[in-house]
Image (cartoon, grey):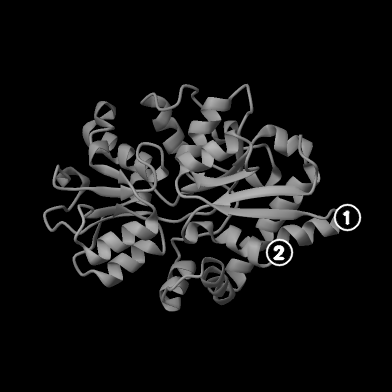
Amino acid sequence: THAEGQIRIAQQFGISYLLLHVVQDQKLIEKHGKAQGLAITPQWLQLSGGAAINDALLSGSIDIGGAGIGPMLTLWDRTKGRQNVKGVASLGNTPYYLISTNPNVRTVADLSEKDRIALPAVGVSVQSRYLQLAAAKRWGDGGFNKLDKFTVTLPHPEAVAAIVRGGTEVNAHFATPPFQEQELAANPKARVILNSYDVLGGPSSPNALYATEAFRTQNPRTYRAFVQALADASKLISQQPELAADIYLRVNNAKLDRELLLKVIRSPEVQFSLTPQNTFVLADFMARVGAIRNRPASVQDYFFNDAHLRGGS
């Protein structure tokens, strides 16, 4: 059991996690806890890859995990009828680019043994699932895992170094902002060969925050403070992009061009909304190819029934 007032949150790298960076920096959970007469001490962890996040959530070492929709669906599927892990909120919509430095590669159909694609977790991460979805669109559901053998697990910061500097076997990276923008700016050979929005048919939420049903029911005030903190962060980012950029640089201790960062935050393609958008395409695909056993009927199956999630897709 949990004592109200405790919340341990694991996040990953990149602007996709900006909502959490703002919550952390501005002490918004503490603020909303206090308003309910509750002292909350959040603990913040940074892990790389959905597999690590899922292990931490299952072992009870974290309460809230931030990872791709793919890893969340995997855990929802595995815990259905037991811990009942579900989505707490989307982390917003951001396009993910598959970037290649191989001049012979124009589309995913050109990828071969000569290519090694870095992504956060082979077979599990949302990038891995997007690649499978792209393969299924190209070669049919039977060929969904055709490109898996060209993928390698590498945290985003290390993948950037490989793409920018070259000299390793990694010549492609299924990235996230700001890493993809960094690569495109730094290496003239780097090109986008796939945009996740094209695979999914429009803007979509690649990441979500998720928790066990027990955490939500046993800690209603802490949970509410967390969701209210996210809503505040969403507002801050849209109203004060400059402050949001400074927060990102501060929390991540990032050596990153501020203008590049602002460009991403202000991009019309990027939204920091809590309501999931266009995630069901991936859920349905994962059920079709047997990556998850339980077939969700709608987004309501794998997100909690909370007000801020209504109208999600």
Q: Which residue is mark 1?
A: 37
Could you say where residue 199 lies in the image, as x and y percent from the top left? 34, 45
Quarter of the view holding residue 299: top right
Q: Nearer the viewer, residue 34 or 134?
A: 34
Could you say where residue 163 lies in the image, as x and y percent from the top left? 26, 61
Mark 2: give few (<14), some (14-19) or many (20+) Cα within 10 Å.
some
Q: Amino acid at mark 1?
A: Gly
Q: Which residue is mark 2?
A: 27
Q: Residue at x 20, y 70 (%)?
A: 188
Q: Is residue 264 above or below residue 103?
A: below
Q: Secondary structure at mark 1?
A: loop
Q: Is residue 143 above or below residue 115?
A: above
Q: Nearer the viewer, residue 166 or 183?
A: 166
Q: Secondary structure at mark 2?
A: loop
Who comes first in sequence, dot 1 or dot 2? 2
Could you say where residue 20 lies in the image, as x and y percent from the top left? 60, 58
Mark 1: give few (<14), some (14-19) or many (20+) Cα within 10 Å.
few
Q: Residue at x 44, y 52 (%)?
A: 203
